[in-house]
Image (cartoon, grey):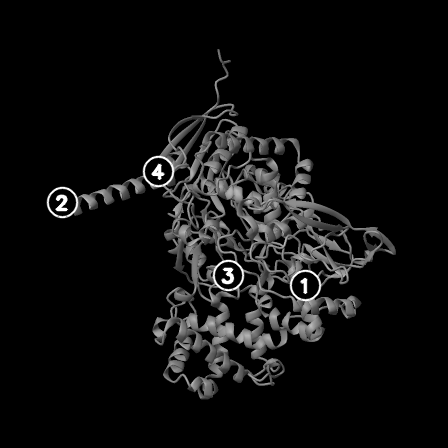
Amino acid sequence: MESSMPWLIVALLVSITGSIWLGWRAWWRRGLPQLNGRIVMPGLRSAVEVVRDHWGVPHIFASNEEDLVFAQGVVHAQDRLWQMEVFRRLGHGRLSELFGEAALPVDTRVRILGWSESADRDWQALDKQTRHLLECYAAGVNAMLIRLGKHLPPEFRLLHHTPEPWQPTDTLVWSKVMSWGLSVNWISEVLHTVLVTRLGPERAAELLDEYPSEHPLVLAEQSVRQFVQELEEELRLPQQLPGWPSLASLSNAWVVHGRLSKSGFPLLAGDPHLSVQMPSLWYECHLCCPQWQVIGAGIAGAPGIVIGHNTDIAWSVTAALPDTQDLYWERVRQNGGMEVEYCGQWEPVQVRQEPIYVRGWRRPAWVDVMQTRHGPIINPLLPSQPAGSGASQPEVRTSLPLLALRHTGDEPNFIARAILKLNRARNWQEFREALRDWTSPPQCFVYADRAGNVGFQMAGLVPIRRRGFGQIPKPGWTEEYEWQGWIPFEELPCEHNPGRGWVVLANHAIVGKEYPYYLTREPLNGLRAKRILELLQAQPRHNLDSFRRIQLDQRCEAAERFCELVRQEQGALSAHARVRHHGRLAQAALQALLAWDLVLDAASVGGTIYEVWLHHVCERLFRPWLGEWTPFFLGLGFHPVLNPAALPFLDRSSLVAIRLLSSAAAGEWCRDELGQPCGATELLAQAFADTLDYLRKRLGGDVRRWQWGRLHRVEFRHVLGQSKLLGWAFNRGPYAYGGDVNTVWQASFTPNWLTGTAQGFTASYRQLFDLADWDRALAIHTTGQSGHPASRHYDDFIPLWLNGEYHPLLWSRQKIEEYQEHRLVLEPASREEPP
């Protein structure tokens, strides 16, 4: 009897463990959507069929467009309800109700910017038909909410949270979020002011690649210098918030005419670049009704498809990055209330108090939102407040100049209408007509159609300034620097069937100096565009295979310049005392760098040495001059969620460093360990020694094991994955990953990457179209279709995406049925009256 006791105990423990496991598994899987059979959905006019393929992409077949967008709302709520909840709360400044004090600084900044009120104004300005379709979409989301009841995805149950009904303005506020994320000129204006104040205009111009053509007297005012000085005294680097959604974007897109393709039809490629997040921002969907049919990637929370193709045309988008923001110094006085001067008169500052309800707090936090004729006072958005602080209201010092922000994102926005019109467009004329309604953020749309036409169109509001170019804050007390309308749509950059047969867009300069309007002086550096063009011109005709190779190319054009500089200095570097201290390790590292083929894949050793060395070069070159502002000049944004990167600086600073070290001006900029002037060789050698110290400590003493992917990793982090207890369930990765900001295979990172706290930006969606046959279309986004961690489609795209693979974007009913895995019919409620 005694000998059997241990076995009974083991059996009991196994039974208890098994019961716990089965119970946990049932709890975890609760909320997975019904994908087969029939569901009655009150609000539908007719039955809708939803066929899901092997990759989890829903193909929705409806008999009218109202039911079509209703059903899209249903499937979005089935697969991405948590993501929709987080993003609408981000847009309305209500994250603190879910996440408590940690989200309060985000909500405070959003309330200051007034996105929710702006979305309300957009709703009032929309036409009746678009409003009706947005209401149909919201009805679909809410019908699914009612059906789910308490069987919500696990995030809701973990937080004991029940979502409110979806409102059409929850869709519209998302355009405000995206518009802000793609409009970062206000950060540039602050940094330009700091550079000019610290360095003087001529030396600042050397860092900005050109001499500023405007220096208003306001820069000489003591109050502005005091402003910069006090900002520096309180300057704090943004505290990272892993897993939180963040906003930044780059992108590639190109198209070739049929005469340059093997099929005789146009080819189109696109890969928008967004911050790494879990789940992916994009959601693929196929929408079919008698009026129109479209497939591609959209946003869960909004009807329609943002990038993709319909029966007749295909398109993709890139960030145009024009200057759509201006900062204004406001001259303030107290006169029973705060007033600002304008044209010799004093106007009251509009002040409103907004409550922010914080989970775990008995009372709300109150935010004072101040606004002038130019826009909100954005001093609290500057990096002098800790991003993780619980302070309900960052201090606004009226003794210092106030900065007001004007932004085209605050203007009436008709993107919802533009997307739906774009989805229905059948030709170039209708495509352009749809884009007239695209207001903010400005984008460049690359285009192809089945009739053989190709081209691109820039769309969005770009201000015409009375004076100046918006590179630094302007006096707000005069009308001299006001906006006077927008660049007319007919005069925005556009090309239709260019004689060369191709269009390449990669966030580089769109127009030359002959263009009659000002767009920006801060395009990205053009290295990605240069590489894409080289590969396009390397063969006479292309197909999807060659387009795929271009999209996945990891050659780093910027590294060629740096390696040439090192090659010129190789002898002197090897003889430097700090380098000689590392002995054979230093020589092995130099040889690895100079033998490198410039392909920055995850296995590259030379690429690792290049990236780390260049980072230390930038630190040593710029920090003596810029101090604590150095990370911002290298591309760090002012906030980890709202502005994770200063995009115009992200790809500029390293090239500026290489240019300065290669020029006669090197001696004027370089400083040694003691802060004394030195030459380029000394600075390169000190930075190389820093690199060897870092890599030996981080990766060991064998240079052969210094692969780029061991440092450069991508991790898909969920907002609840910050907890170690939940991280294993919600997060995926980290994974070794190649590329950087200058490779076509986009893999940008903010300059704090050596500490492991960087945020990454990458190809969030890749699409390839041969217009000869829609069934040959290929696509992939980063994670998977589902936002439910118990679904197999939560992370099934990750290995494909990492390996540069795609899935077919099925179009014909025959192909859809060939790969069909689920079929669900949404049925309208019975019209018979209950007995």
Which is nearer the eye, 387 or 46?
Answer: 387
Residue annotated with mark 1: 190
Q: Secondary structure at mark 3?
A: helix
Q: Distance between the Cα atoms at labels 3 and 1?
A: 34 Å
> Does label 3 or label 1 sit earlier along the sequence?
1
Q: Distance between the Cα atoms at labels 2 and 3?
A: 76 Å
Residue annotated with mark 3: 533
The label nearer to you, 2 versus 1, is 2
Residue 780 at x, y percent in the picture:
43, 49
Q: Badge 4, how many Cα within 10 Å: few under 14, some, many 20+?
A: few
> Does label 2 or label 1 sit earlier along the sequence?
2
Residue annotated with mark 2: 4
Q: Distance between the Cα atoms at labels 4 and 3?
A: 53 Å
Which is nearer the eye, 39 or 814?
Answer: 39
Label for residue 26?
Answer: 4
The label nearer to you, 3 versus 1, is 1
Q: Secondary structure at mark 2?
A: helix
